[in-house]
Amino acid sequence: MSQLRHTHENKVLELFDHLDAPTRPQTPEEVRLRQLIAQHGSPLLVMDAERLRQQYRQLKAALPGVDLFYAVKALPDADAIRILTGQGAGLDLATAGEVDMARSAGVSPRRTIHTHPIKKDSEIKAALRFGTTTFVVDNWNELKKFRAYRNRVGLLLRVRFQSPDAVVDLSRKFGCDPHEAIELMRRAVHEGIRIKGLSFHVGSQSGRSDTHVHAIETAVALINQAHREGLGHLKVLDIGGGFPVDYQHKAIDINAFCAPIRNALISVPSWVRVIAEPGRYLVAPAVTAVATVVGKAERDDRPWYYLDDGVYGSYSGQMFDHADYPVETFREGNERESVLAGPTCDSIDIVKDAITLPELEIGDLIVGRQMGAYTAATATDFNALPRARMVLINDVAEQPSDLVKLAEA
Amino acid sequence: MSDTLPEIDTSSAEAVTSRFRYEETLYDAWGQAFDVDEIFFEHKTDHQHLVIFQNALFGRVMALDGVIQTTEADEFVYHEMLTHVPILAHGHAKSVLIIGGGDGGILREVSRHASVEKITMVEIDAAVVDMSKQYLPNHSNGAFDDPRLNLVIADGADFVANAEAAQFDVIISDSTDPIGPGEVLFTQDFYAQAKRLLRPGGVMVTQNGVAFMQLDEVRTTARRMSRLYNDATFYSAAVPTYVGGVMTFAWSTDNVDLKCVDLDTLQSRFAAAQIETRYYNPAVHAASFALPEYIRQAAAEASA
């Protein structure tokens, strides 16, 4: 290969020169992923549009009558936004940058809510300028920021509920205690600022919906109390997110998870619109990470395989999101305890420290499942390494596709 | 969910702003919506969304980021009142500065005054002028060809900071809302720099929003202007598509007599100008300084 034409793609082709591939049968998924890598380079994040639509429909079916606002922070990707809003989702936005993504996507601002409990004035203005008029507050200082915009906005008061078994506890950083809520509503009425509903977020990846149920019950009591005390109609109940996905092959039945929530929502007064902010549930299963083994070494009696993606890249969720993604290889054989290391110079960049794997070769693919949420979103540029490229498949629905469907996670 | 709770379909939320319906998103609890007969122009970036469409009642409508900017049917109210009130109150305005106003509506009204010798217009975006000439031609009605016009494409705030002092009799600020690209045209600094450009006895007017919905804008402007001018008040007009009651225009001058020029004088100046109007007349001019009590009080408290 000419030195002058030593492009990124060529590097990929070079990589395959080391392969003993023809001797080993490949699954349809491996064939497809190798095609994508030959076309786009490695590493990749492969987003399956059909899976995205399927996740939306499943949650919608599990929560009938609840309007879903996709939490853009989980995967701020234009295709994901387009596909989910095409299914009917609204958008849950938290920053001016996410507001710009909603505008670019052509989503009506009336289908967006701004849910960051703590905001700069410039963030409020940016959202108002787009036309988002629903905001979230959880304390008096934040409420005061809306004095100047009092006629323009409808606020949701975020109330906190501790979820004892949530993997990511969001109630520590945000939310007022239920007993503070009524007092804040009083002060809002006095200021002429409209609080139009309540929101809560029980935390992420809770295995049970007990906390959702408890939060709904408490919220309904608050809604009724506010109504009795003449503090106005709380006409929106935002039940947040926290709908779990399966990172470790423990089958999670979203319909069963949501059954107690459906039951609890029966007590919600008829004038209340119930909404939710799913992020992880919608996007995590729709994205598969594909990295390539670029080096191997034997250290302390264990094989170390060096990948071109790691915890500073797509696997950033292992650091920030407490996630432990299912990782697979296509090769079979005698398994040994092995190490999968990322491409940066930092020793913390370890994707898996003790994973049993068959003997791998340079050029082999490593596949990460459930990698749509808080992966690309929190990847860094450390070491000036390029981030994994996002590739969309199965975008066209309702028509036979020649694409091989990725294996179900 | 209980049987009593109606299913809310999010797709209905999508329908409110679509190719067929434009919903203004100024307020959470209330708003106006327009039937869209035809879209003439649409420009969407990450940072703004501008659209010009046809509506059966209001003709061509221009909207920016969910806020109606101007319509062919009712623009005369705004443009006549923001122009003829300061020029005819002043009586011998020779040099007029327009800040913003890229659609050309203010320019059209100013250029109808034969007595004005120099018109300077500062618009931040040349594309707005080109687009308005093409899609809202009735707004400027050829006024961009007025030989008295000096069109400057620049940031209004930069212009007033750097322009030579004491060169204008009337300054008209025709901006977007303070929450939006026009934000800088509502700052204390802008007002102070603009004042520097006024000749003695000159007057500055600015669009100041719909007071019932945005009373804080009245308070903020009153507080800022009253520090700079002997006379800082408001006058008003009802512009149908600036919904929520009367729109206020800020009035700032060191000449306290300017807002109470007697009706006979206004009549003779109006007659001499030979201008045909549809909203403005001297009686409306004089009456427009009478403020509803909630506006008067808000302004008075803020100026105190």
Image (cartoon, coloured by chain):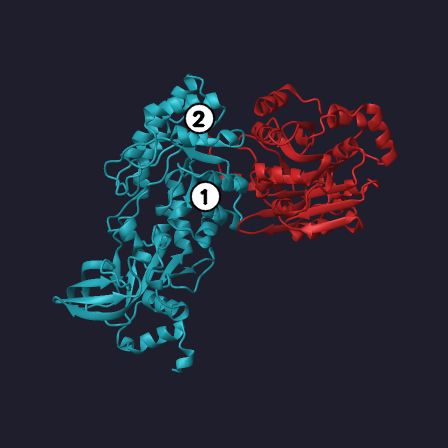
Look at label 2 and name its amino acid.
Answer: Leu
Tally the marks.
Answer: 2
Q: Is residue A362 left or right of residue A118?
A: left
Task: Name the residue located 26 percent from the left edge and 35 percent from the top edge.
Answer: A163
Front one among B103 and A77:
B103
Give neighbour class at mark 1: few <14, some 14-19, many 20+ (Cα, 10 Å). many
Q: Is residue B44 left or right of residue B250?
A: left
Q: Calculate the distance from the C-alpha at mark 1 to the C-alpha at mark 2.
A: 21 Å
**Residue annotated with mark 1:** A91
Name the chain letter of the residue that bears numbered label 2. A
> In x, y percent, where is residue B13?
52, 39
- Relative to A159, say whether A375 is above or below: below
Task: Name the residue located 38 percent from the left edge and 82 percent from the top edge.
Answer: A1
- Relative to B187, say whether B153 is above or below: below
> In x, y percent, where is residue A101?
48, 49
Look at label 1 and name its amino acid.
Answer: Leu
Which of marks 2 and 1 precedes in the sequence? 1
Name which quarter of the figure residue A131 lies in.
Answer: top right
Residue A234 numbered mark, or none: 2
Give neighbour class at mark 2: few <14, some 14-19, many 20+ (Cα, 10 Å). many
Colour of chain B, in one word, is red
Name which quarter of the figure residue B118 lies in.
Answer: top right
Q: Secondary structure at mark 1?
A: strand
Name the chain letter of the residue that bears numbered label 1. A
Chain shaded cyan: A
